[in-house]
Image: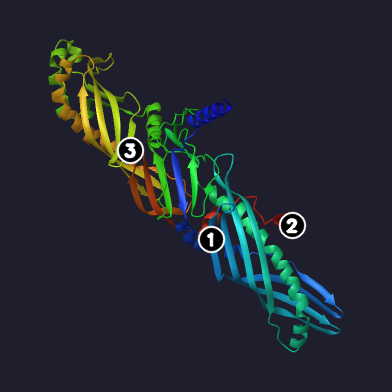
């Protein structure tokens, strides 16, 4: 009995489980590009290491090292890969740092000072970035683990006291190596938790698409990392929503999108629910309607409509007979999207109301008919925008009053279809071609896109392109409170 209850509860929980309407997968194919751009950024960050002055004494030998600056960084070997327990793991080995500093040395009564170059050899860095969702549903770097070591320091002393410097250099190099070891991890901790998060802050989570509708990309859970991929699922209880109805939501009954490919750098999957919520939002916002009055109605159609309803018009008063004709198209219910391997279609049912609109007088209705249309949608991805081009494939009008009236509407079928193709479809395509933004950080775009239809969802595979460098984007979005890395003790 207990087993049956447990099974029932598990099935019940599964029935109410929140399904993602959108998924994004970053594959290991993207890591080489990310590593190249990241290492350039990391080199610049490590060059900002602030090493405190080193001073001390050994017998009658006194030394002071100050104004230490990192002049160059050479990363000989590096590897970036996914790791389930660390999310992103970066290994740097056999790197070297070039240093330039001021020396002040005193031995008995002999004093020497000046600037000197040194190098830190055998620099090894192992750092991991842990990714999670913050309270707003945005992806964040939640923790940075770090291990760093410098195997040896070399200093090129010269001049009259070169041999004496070389004898005492052990005390200087050991002190500088110790301080350098302490400064690398705090810089990486700061770069991950502050600077990289400022880059992730540019990923749109909740934003407006236009004056009527907004879009909400919120993570359903923390990103899931395997040995080859990083997968993100987006909540999308309301991927789109009317701006005037903030609490609006739509139940997700669509098929859960699946991601199985890994040849491209990034894959994005959208279920039918993603598109249904967009059309539901525009329907709720009152945008799925069109009204043509007077000169806006094509003259040929105006003449045909007046001839069709001549029997009704001739019985009206003379003040109404010559009134402007008004044609109103309005969706009766939200359009619905169907995605199949053969293509994507959108079905819509609308009412077509034909009236005479005399100035300063009530409108006189001539006819009200039902229109059913089916549109094909070709999806493309350009930059960061998911775009669609619509084409009218099927069109039918009929009367819900009588079959006889439906027969009388047959002559209007072709003119109304032409009106939709010439007057309505360009307006729809103007909007759908602007597209909606996919959640990517600023400065990163999609290239070489491939769209594939499946049963109930569509996937887009693409590679990444850095239109801007990480440094440029981070400097633009650097937090105002960001001054310096945390102390080394805190990083440890």
The residue that appears at 47% across and 57% down in the rendered structure is 28
- SS state under label 1: strand
Spatial CA span between label 2 and label 3: 55 Å
Residue 413: x, y in percent?
17, 27
Residue 330: x, y in percent?
30, 25
Q: Which quadrant holds residue 491? A: bottom right
The residue that appears at 44% across and 41% down in the rendered structure is 22
Q: Is residue 72 above or below residue 281?
A: below
Q: Residues within 10 Å of mark 1 (few under 14, many from 20)?
A: some
Residue 386: x, y in percent?
38, 44
**Nearest the camera: 388 or 471?**
388
Specify the farthest residue to the front.
Answer: 1
Q: Which quadrant holds residue 320? A: top left
The residue that appears at 21% across and 24% down in the rendered structure is 397
Q: Which quadrant holds residue 359? A: top left
Q: Which residue is mark 2?
A: 489
Q: Is residue 205 above or below residue 50?
A: above
Spatial CA span between label 2 and label 1: 26 Å
**Nearest the camera: 208 or 487?**
487
Disc number placed over residue 121 in the picture, else none:
none
Q: Quadrant of the N terminus?
A: top right
Residue 447: x, y in percent?
38, 55
The residue that appears at 59% across and 39% down in the rendered structure is 135
Q: Is residue 269 above or below residue 249?
A: below
Q: Which residue is mark 3?
A: 339
Q: Residues within 10 Å of mark 2 (few under 14, many from 20)?
A: few
Q: Which residue is mark 1?
A: 80
Of circles 2 and 3, the one toward us is 3
Of circles 2 and 1, the one toward us is 1
**Nearest the camera: 352 or 152?**
152
Spatial CA span between label 1 and label 3: 37 Å
């Amino acid at each position: 009995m207990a087993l049956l209850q447990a099974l029932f509860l598990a099935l019940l929980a599964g029935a109410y489980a929140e399904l993602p309407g959108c998924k994004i997968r970053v594959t290991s194919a993207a890591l080489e590009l990310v590593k190249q751009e990241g290492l350039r950024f990391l080199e610049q960050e490590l060059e900002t290491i602030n090493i405190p002055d080193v001073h001390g004494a050994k017998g009658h030998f006194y030394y002071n090292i100050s104004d230490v600056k990192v002049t160059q960084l050479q990363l000989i070997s590096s590897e970036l890969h996914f790791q389930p327990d660390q999310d992103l793991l970066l290994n740097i080995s056999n790197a070297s740092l070039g240093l330039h500093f001021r020396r002040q040395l005193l031995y008995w009564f002999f004093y020497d000072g000046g600037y000197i170059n040194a190098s830190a050899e055998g620099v090894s860095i192992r750092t991991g970035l842990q990714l999670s969702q913050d309270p707003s549903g945005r992806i964040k770097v939640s923790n940075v683990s770090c291990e760093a070591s410098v195997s040896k320091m070399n200093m090129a002393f010269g001049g009259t006291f070169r041999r004496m410097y070389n004898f005492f250099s052990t005390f200087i190099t050991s002190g500088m190596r110790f301080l350098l070891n302490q400064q690398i991890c705090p810089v990486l901790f700061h770069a991950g938790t502050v600077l990289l998060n400022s880059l992730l802050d540019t990923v749109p989570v909740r934003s407006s698409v236009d004056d009527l509708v907004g879009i909400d990309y919120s993570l359903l859970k923390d990103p899931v990392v395997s040995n080859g991929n990083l997968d993100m699922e987006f909540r999308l209880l309301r991927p789109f929503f009317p701006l005037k109805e903030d609490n609006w939501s739509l139940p997700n009954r669509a098929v859960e999108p699946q991601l199985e490919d890994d040849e491209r750098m990034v894959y994005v999957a959208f279920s039918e629910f993603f598109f249904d919520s967009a059309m539901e939002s525009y329907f709720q916002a009152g945008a799925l309607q069109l009204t043509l009055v007077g000169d806006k109605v094509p003259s040929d159609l105006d003449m045909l409509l007046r001839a069709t309803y001549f029997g009704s018009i001739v019985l009206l008063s003379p003040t109404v007979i010559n009134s402007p004709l008004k044609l109103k198209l309005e969706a009766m219910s939200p359009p619905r999207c169907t995605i199949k391997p053969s293509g994507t279609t959108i079905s819509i049912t609308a009412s077509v109301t034909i009236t005479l609109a005399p100035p300063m007088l009530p409108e006189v209705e001539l006819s009200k008919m039902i229109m059913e249309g089916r549109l094909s949608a070709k999806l493309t991805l350009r930059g960061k925008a998911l775009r669609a081009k619509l084409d009218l494939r099927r069109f039918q009008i009929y009367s819900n009053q009588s079959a006889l009236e439906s027969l009388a509407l047959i002559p209007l079928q072709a003119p109304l279809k032409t009106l939709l193709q010439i007057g309505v479809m360009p307006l729809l395509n103007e909007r759908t071609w602007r597209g909606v933004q996919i959640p990517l950080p600023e400065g990163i775009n999609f290239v070489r896109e491939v769209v594939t239809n499946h049963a109930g969802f569509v996937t887009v595979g693409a590679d990444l392109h850095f239109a801007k460098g990480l440094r440029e984007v981070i400097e633009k979005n650097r937090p105002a409170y960001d001054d310096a890395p945390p102390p080394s003790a805190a990083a440890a």
